[in-house]
Image: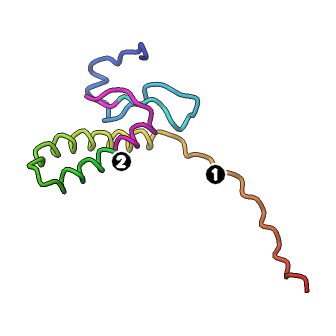
Amino acid sequence: MDSYQYPAKEYREAEEGIIYGTTKDPWDPKVLIKGYGVLRLSQIKKHVAEDLREMLKRSRSDNDEFSNIGAIMDTTLRKVKAIIDVQKKLKPKPKPAQQPEAPITPPSQ
């Protein structure tokens, strides 16, 4: 775990997601999610997808599991807000250089 501690005032005033450290990929930073923990950006996206699948599964079940959906929804919303906050701060990923298209040649007869 990173040793940097945000001052309490800075943490309270911060957005939902704070870039907390770097990884080998500059577009996949470590993100501190307030009230949740530290994950890489790509991990947060996977967690959100898993959470949505879990909420769908629970909503379709015959059991009375709707009360559990609310708790999942709260943490999922926090993760989504963290993704949005961090993506605003990241520089756009450069687009790969496009290869020139090869000319179309008619088939030989």
Q: Position of residue 11 (x, y in %)?
A: 30, 24
> Which residue in the rendered view is the most extreme toward the right?
109
| In the foreground, 41 or 18 | 41
Residue at the disc numbered 1: 95
Left/right of residue 20 with respect to residue 12 in the rendered view: right
What residue is rendered at 57% in x and 34% in y?
25
Type of the residue with mark 2: Ala
- Residue 61: x and y in percent read 16, 53
Q: Residue at x 8, y 49 (%)?
A: 64
Tag 2–tag 1 contact (CB < 8 Å):
no
Disc 1 secondary structure class: loop
- How crowded pointer 2 is (Cα within 10 Å; few <14, some 14-19, many 20+) is rated as few
Screen quadrant of the N terminus: top left
Q: Is residue 62 magenta?
A: no
Magenta region includes residue 37: yes
Report the disc number at residue 75: none
The residue nearer to you, when weighing 67 against 10, is 67
Residue at left offset 36%, top offset 47%: 49
Residue 75, how many percent across, how many down?
24, 38
User: The C terminus lies in which quarter of the figure?
Assistant: bottom right
Residue, disc 2? 49
Which residue range is magenta in the image?
A: 33-48
